[in-house]
Amino acid sequence: MKRILLAILLLVIVAGCGERSPSGDVSAPDLKIGRMKVSIWPEYDTEGVLVVYEGKFYDRERFPAKAAFVLPKGVRELTDACSLSPKGEHFCQLYEVSQRGRHSEAILKLPYPDFFIDFQYNPLSGDEKREFEYTISSKYPVELLEVNIQQPLRSSEFNVTPVSSKESEEKGFRHLHYTYEGIPQGKEVRFSISYKKQDSRPSVDIKSASMANSSGTAGSNRSYMIFLAGGVLLLILLGYYRYSANRKKG
């Protein structure tokens, strides 16, 4: 019985070690991103701005690896920090966010080269006239950068600089699209966004959006599940061991 307990305890410890938050410098600074899409949606499901980074690294054989992502200054946490498996499953990861001068930086270890991270921040004022600047910058060269900027519902005089040459409409939202090729490491791509909006309500209901996000994101971390299952099994076996010992004494 003691050997079984020791084996389970070892399994729990190993799984827990796999879940430690990443620390230190990025282990593979010479990676390259093949495709990256950045979505910038002001006042979508909160009063702030929703930003989504998704894409895939070019050097697929070099993963698992640590990766760093540049965020606006002041951002301290992510809503999602996931790596996508070849089957499209989301494996959420622990991460670290630190302040780096004029921007923040998130570091996470990706088991697969495909990534999906999103966060909220609020550079907007409470005035009817709202404007902010968003700067996209990458720690790695990007072969293809796609940008999607969404106009909030119930807004007017929506202007973005630079001017987009492609627009689309989806579910009542107006989207502006941009495409850039061969973005060098560290190059900044800036967008100035302004519009008028009389209310502070987001475009979609917050509760409905939260339910949809929670049901649509798998967030299935294999090591975490092993850790949880091992802990439960350990408690069961400890209870059985105490029960057997007390029974023998009786």
Image (cartoon, rainbow, N blue to C red):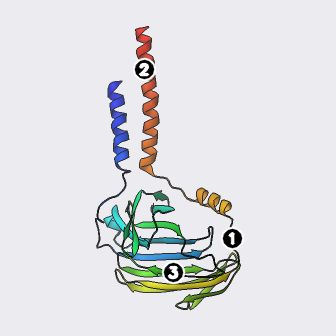
Residue 11 image label: none
Query: Which residue sits at x=28%, y=73%?
Result: 30
Q: Which residue is mark 3?
A: 147
**Disc 3 on helix, strand or loop?**
strand
Is residue 39 in view? yes
Give the spatial CA distance, label 3 vs label 1. 25 Å
**Quarter of the picture holding the N terminus:** top left
Amino acid type, mark 3? Val
Q: Residue 81 at what x, y percent from top left?
A: 46, 62
Q: Which mark is residue 242?
A: 2
106 and 131: which is toward the camera: 131
Q: Nearer the viewer, residue 215 or 43?
A: 43
Say if mark 3 contacts mark 1, CB within 8 Å: no
**In the visual, does 32 lie left or right of 121?**
left
> Is the residue marked by circle 3 packed among few (<14), some (14-19), or many (20+) residues within 10 Å?
some
- In primary-sequence order, the first of circles 2 and 1 is 1
